[in-house]
Image (spheres, rainbow, N blue to C red):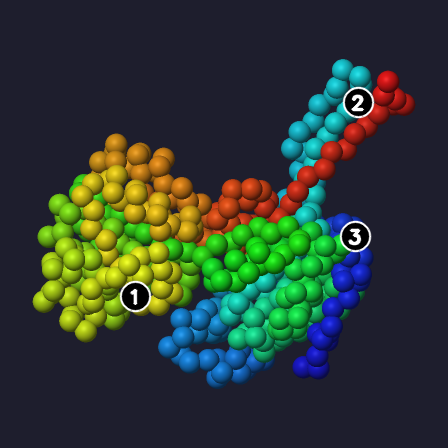
Amino acid sequence: MPTLVKTTVDFAAIKRASRAALQLTNQAIDDVLRAVADAAVTHVDFILAENQKDLNRMDPANPKYDRLQLTSERIEAIAQDMRNVADLPSPLGKVQEERTLDNGLHLVRKSVPLGVVGVIYEARPNVTFDVFALCLKAGNVAVLKGGSDAEYSNLAIAEVIHRVLEEHNLDQNLMSLLPASREATHELLNAVDTVDVIIPRGSQNLINYVRENAKVPVIETGAGIVHTYFDKSGDLEKGKAIVFNAKTRRVSVCNALDCLIIHQERLQDLPELTNKLASEDVKIYADRLSYTVLSGVYPDELLHPAFPEHFGTEFLSHKMSIKTVANLAEALDHTAQYSSKHSEAIIAEDESTLQTYMQSVDAAAVYANTSTAYTDGAEFGMGAEIGISTQKLHARGPMALPELTSYKYLVYGQGQVRE
């Protein structure tokens, strides 16, 4: 497949493309998204071959390996997510407010695109498809800066997308892929006359770097340091299933469990609560009380004493810590100290405890008696997501179509002038 992907990016052309995007009909956008979904499946061999080049450069033991890896099944799921986005109603042109002032001026507040959305991300090539789909559906132009770990994969995906744009006689600048270099990152962070917002997706180090160096407004999609609190009123059967799922469903994602907090009155249930984790070779870093209970029960080679650095860590691997607390207040304090405000959960049957936890925990998604693995735009019925925002301005939680819009006031008059 001869390449259409440019090695340089024309920011002036990107800005022009953002104005042209305002003229696209909803039908034209949906047709392109469905065509890209079909093309991803049609060209699966090409995409997987390029993805393998990236995988060959990475140690399979690296926590990023699973995020980087594409499979036929994953590409089919990505394609279905794009079709789901196409099926969703457009977020544009929504009348959010409408009223007539005393002076006769008629005000209408309508949703509009953000404009040019820059996304900086690491070894997750699926983001290339997801961001393009969500940005286009919301009338935005996407400027993508992937990491060098996924360079071949991202180029292949961009090639597929550009091919479809060309077939539909649309501007290829609707989606631009920057080179995988630090210079390109610097250029994007400083594109104040072109880029309207930047969204970083990746490690805390990446997010901190973008926040500290960007001149363009930033929406943070934070790292996930995830806790689940097993209360003294917790149901053991629910707890076993929830803890196992939250930790092992996919360890490299940001909603995976990092720290199990357990009420000291339920320590006797800890061996059963964690038993199945050993089947997935989950390494546990246990505090003094939980270590004593698990010693001789949980496999010795997988059980280790916890040190301070094991709390507040996003493991992204088959590792987790355990913290014992005397009461709900201690659980809330530990969570508040180490949480990244991404996803937190409680397992409890006592209604008062549930309500206190749900109201007190400061996170984008707070769960009662279920797995944190559900923090995902597709799972929330959004089609796909552009990231999980952990901040409180503009957007919080899974960011999808509504979060990729702003609004403007349309003011209709009949010759009024202000005194």
Residue at 31% over, 38% down:
357
Left or right of 185, for residue 262: left
Q: Which residue is mark 1?
A: 319
Asked if residue 170 can be seen in this view, the reply is no
In-image side of 106 versus 300 (left or right): right
Res. 411 in view = yes
Front-lying residue, 244 or 65: 65
Q: Quadrant of the N terminus?
A: bottom right
Element at badge 1? Answer: strand
Front one among 39 and 404: 404
Horizontal relation, residue 255 to residue 228: left or right: right
| Quadrant in which residue 318 is drawn | bottom left
Q: In this picture, is 240 found above or below 315?
A: above
Q: Residue at x 74, y 72 (%)?
A: 8
The amino acid type, in three-letter code, at marker 3 is: Arg
Packing grade of label 2 (10 A; few <14, some 14-19, many >=20) is: some
Label for residue 19? Answer: 3
Q: Amino acid at mark 1?
A: Lys
Image spot of residue 418 (x, y percent): 85, 21
Contact between marks 3 and 1 (CB within 8 A): the answer is no
Could you tell me residue 237's position as x and y percent?
19, 51
Looking at the image, which is closer to me, 124 or 202?
202
The image quarter containing residue 130 is: bottom right
Say which residue label 2 marks. Answer: 105
